[in-house]
Image (tube, rainbow, N blue to C red):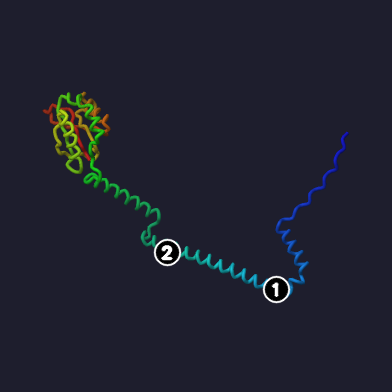
Amino acid sequence: MSEQSPPSAPEEPQLPEWAVNLAWAQHHIRTNWEALVKPPVIMILLLTALIGYYVGSSGSREEIGVKNERISFCNEQVSAYRDRLQGATPDQAAKEIAGLRAKLQASDEKIQILMPDEPRHISEKQKGTLLSHKDELAKLKKPILVYAWYLGDSVQYALEFVTLLSSNNILALGPMTTVCEKEERGILVGLKDKENPSDDAKTFIGALKSSGFVVNSTKWNMQKDANLDFDLFICP
């Protein structure tokens, strides 16, 4: 049988660092007591303590002063906001601001309809793609009537369509001024029968869409004796 090693002695618990420092300080104070109680040493210790106290209190006063200035500034800002809000709560102010923004956006949309910052034009790419369909458009049985809203850039935009089509042997007439309903916006193809557009109308709409135009349709109330089934509306 193998011999068993004797059990090891339990480790003594270590003192915390502050206790070790305290014991070190006590040891050196006892050892050097006579030198520490001499008047010059006491004066140096007192002077060091006073300097430390002064530096610490001075830093605290500066920190408190900075904090007081910040508090004063925040109070002034809060007071200014209260005056501007005229007693309204933050929720009421936020609701009022949201309402004003909505009104401003609606007003801007109306202004853009009357005086757009960037008037619409047919791009060169759109012209090229649309003219790639000129043979099939030239075979349409009826002329294309072009109508435009009388304000904003609609008339000029419609004139570009008439000029482009007419100069390539595609019969287009206009632009003639009209009134667009509130929900009628952009490029519209007016159809006598929205549910069953004619082959000519489908050809025209397909050519516009393949050229990158966003096209919608609308009901077209043409005169009964007119032998036409679709036209082009340019709305704001």
Q: Which numbered tag is attached to residue 212?
A: none
Residue visible at 77% across and 64% down? 27
Question: In screen coordinates, is 195 left or right of 145?
Answer: right
Q: Estimate the x, y position of residue 184 in percent, counting from the top left.
A: 23, 38
Q: Is residue 58 above or below residue 85?
A: below
Q: Which residue is mark 1?
A: 42
Which residue is drawn at the image coordinates 24% and 37% (left, top)?
A: 186
Residue 230 found in image quarter: top left
Which three-letter amino acid code belongs to the residue tagged 2? Glu
Residue that label 2 marks: 76
Q: Quadrant of residue 162?
A: top left
Q: Residue at x 36, y 51 (%)?
A: 95
Q: Amino acid at mark 1?
A: Ile
Where 77 falls versus 1 (above or below)? below
Q: Secondary structure at mark 2?
A: helix
In the depicted structure, whether residue 80 falls above or below residue 219: below
For the point 25% across and 43% down, which residue is it?
118
* Front-most of residues 158 and 72: 158
Secondary element type, mark 1: helix
> Could you tell whether 16 is left or right of 50 in the image?
right
Closer to the camera in the image, 30 or 111: 30
How far, Cα to Cα, is label 2 from label 1?
51 Å
User: Where in the figure is residue 13, as x and y percent of width and height?
Assistant: 76, 52
Outermost residue, bottom direction?
39
**Which quadrant of the figure contains the C terminus?**
top left
